[in-house]
Amino acid sequence: MHLDNMSESRIAHLDMDAFFAAVEQRDDPLLRGKPVVVGGLGARGVVATASYEARTFGIHSAMSTAHARRLCPGGVFLAPQFDKYRRVSGRVMGILRSVSSSIEPISLDEAFFDLSASASTLDDAAQIASDVKRHVWRETRLSCSVGVAPNRFLAKLGSELDKPDGFKVIHPDEVDSVLAPLGVGQLWGVGRVTERRLCSMGLRTVADLRTVPSALLDREFGQMGRVLYRLARGQDPTPIRTRRDSRSISREITYPLDLKDPIEMEASLRGMAHEVGVQLAEQHLAARTVRIKVRFPDFRTETRQIGLAVPTSSPHLIGELAVHLLHERAEVGNHGVRLLGVGVSRLSAASVRQLSLFDDVDGGAQDGLGASFR
DNA sequence: TCTGGGGTCCTAGGACCC
DNA sequence: TCTGGGGTCCTAGGACCC
């Protein structure tokens, strides 16, 4: 299970360049060469993707759209068209599937694919991956960046380091020199908070991190310590996961203006609960936990959840429980809420027998509600 | 930086049981 | 009755990812 084993793998990672914005530019020639920003257009919207032209203005993902507009008043701001992106994504994933039976989509624009079975060396894998990259361009007229390496982490790093329109192979003997100068924030799973903590320990680069004994990282970071120790050495034992069962389903809405009216809050929760219930039913799943999320104007966020004795996919029951949690368990004062959300978890396959049980529970809402509390 | 939406995984504390 | 220890489940919060 050690390194020798790991280095046997040949993993590729493909990442579409500025995906949403690139699709819009592809479909409207007038947008080519211009700063294009795709994201929420409302008062509280954020940027999903900025084209490379927009990035030169300092615009990046997750920034508020309002801020992006100030940085680039002449930019083109578009609401996302997810159906379209999903279609394009489907074609890209199809290309990956044509070269590997083991692919792991991470999002619409990103996926790992395992080439270990079809390529016996990293260079053979690189050849296949480079064909894939060309194939993606031919079929979609979109550019992507590809990394090829002995494991997932290094493959992803490869696609990141040579972006856009990049192609990078990381061989085992280059791992140390590639990793050493990187900032610790470049490691997968190290975000703002962990990066700060590491920096406050005097650890700014991966080379710094590598000087720290495993035991110290364990003590300081728990489970994450092990991961840090390995990533700093370019080790990543996590396999490609082709199919993962979903563990939760949720909907949430940030309102353009804070919601103050309890009636509106209830209606909104019920609407989201309906969508969650429908999605559960579509996927033939049932849930044993119902949860709400409340975010206040000051951005403080609370969650409240309730366990059910019997799994449910009933939109009505989920809605009633959500409303109950809001009134009885959340501390909504009179300042209103900025966001509400409804989610379900502890999912299981809904059997036909369970489905008939749900109907009973749903039919007698009051009784069903009481009986469902743990 | 006035901060979306949909997820995953981890942690800490308390209840409960033996 | 001054007070164990381990395991498991649940809840709430938080870090992180795209």
Image (cartoon, coloured by chain):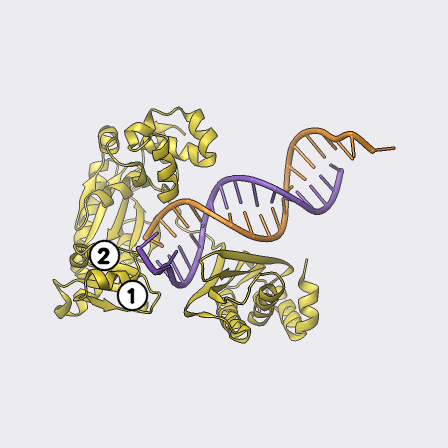
Chain colours: A yellow, B purple, C orange
Identity, as a three-letter code, of the amino acid under mark 2: Ile
Left or right: where A64 falls relative to A316: left
Q: Quadrant of the N terminus of chain A?
A: top left
Which dot marks residue A87?
1
In which quarter of the view is residue A346 placed? bottom right
Q: Pinpoint the chain carrying mark 2.
A: A
Closer to the camera, A108 or A245? A108
Residue A347 in view here: no
- Counting every numbered tag in the picture gives 2
- Dot 1: what SS? helix
Q: Position of residue A232 (x, y in %)?
A: 33, 32
- Kindly give the residue lying farthest to the front in the view shown: A334
Query: Which of the chains bears the disc numbered 1?
Result: A
Query: What residue is at 33 percent from the left and 27 percent from the top?
Result: A210
Quadrant that contains the C terminus of chain A: bottom right
Q: What residue type is disc 1 on? A: Arg
Residue A176: percent from left, percent from top: 25, 29
Give the percent coordinates (x, y) of residue A80.
Answer: 29, 67
Instruction: Report the residue marked by disc 2.
Output: A59
Q: Position of residue A193 (x, y in %)?
A: 39, 42
| Image: A52 above or below A181 | below
Residue A365 visible in the displayed image? yes
Check disc 2 and report its element: helix, strand or loop. Answer: loop
CA–CA distance in space, label 2 to label 1: 26 Å
Q: Quadrant of residue A65?
A: bottom left
